[in-house]
Image (spheres, rainbow, N blue to C red):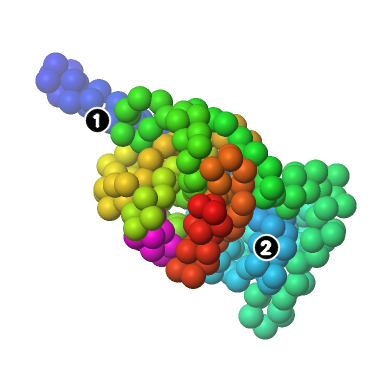
Amino acid sequence: MASQPAASAAAAQTASSKSAQRSASALERAALDRLFNAFFKLPLFAAQYQRRQGRPPTLVELQEQLGLRSPGAVAVLLQVAEADPRMPRFLERDAATGEIRRVDVEAVLAHPRFGKDLERTLSGLEGRAAPAFRAARLDGGPVFESASLAGRAHLVYFWFSNCPPCMQTAPVLAELARARDFPVVAANADRVLELGVGDAERAAYTARLARFTHVHATAELSEAYGGVSVYPTFFFVNRGGIVVRQMVNRQDRAALEAAIRAALE
């Protein structure tokens, strides 16, 4: 008969093993959920990118935007999308490289599942009033209210952690915003995208952008701003509360300067 200490140790080991199995299972489910969500974002993202950038996204850009760690995952998603009857026939790809050669935006617009969402996204907010919102701050401070910026030109900027075009654009934006005393509300979409990024990891980056007002994006906030699906997305708002410029993806200094000037005029 096993001694009581030995039995207790065995029970503890069994409990630890079951806990590890549950954790591994939860991680696997989270990874599958991310792939599932990325799969159904493909048509909207590709069409929006084509329309706003004037070219198809590259495989690397798809990997960055969909939060996938491996280029191979993008290739698999595209292969499945081309064969899945739930998807519009919206892609033409290079047989040798696998890169997207053409995105048929009209095919996505005509699709009963994706058409209305894409139409709303492509219509944009330029010339329209910026939606009012309230959002929790990343640092846990008082809830931010967009009404606090009434009468001031500003930017609402959607991004997520470890997004390469966000990381490249934000430092330039921060420098320009500081020089012009131009408020930036940076809405982080980690939770919306279910990326599993911790508070400490976000804080390490946002500390370098201390002049921004850092808030958590929500599904409702993203929808209010037209269904944000490309990151970063920028909404430059003038003193009258009207969106004067809407831009997506990586932006250079000249484009950001021009947009800030347009908002301040």
Q: Is residue 113 left or right of residue 189?
A: right
Of labels 1 and 2, earlier in sequence is: 1
Type of the residue with mark 1: Gln
Please provide percent x and percent y for residue 200.
Answer: 27, 42
Pointer 1 local density, CA inside 10 Å: few below 14, some 14–19, many at least 20? few
Q: Residue at x 85, y 44 (%)?
A: 112
Magenta span contains residue 172: yes
Question: 236 and 159: which one is in front?
Answer: 236
Residue 178 position, x and y percent, is 34, 54
Q: Which residue is mark 2?
A: 52
Q: What SS does tag 2 mark? A: helix
Residue sitting at 40 percent across and 26 percent down?
Answer: 143
Q: Nearer the viewer, mark 1 or mark 2?
A: 2
C-alpha gap between disc 1 and disc 2: 56 Å
Kindly report the secondary structure that dominates the magenta region of the rendered protein. helix
**Is the C terminus in the top left, top right, bottom left or bottom right quadrant?**
bottom right
Number of the label disc, if any, that sits on residue 13: 1
Closer to the camera, 7 or 108? 108
In the rendered structure, does residue 214 fall within the stretch colored magenta?
Answer: no
Over which residues does the magenta segment extend? 167-177
**Does the image show residue 128?**
yes
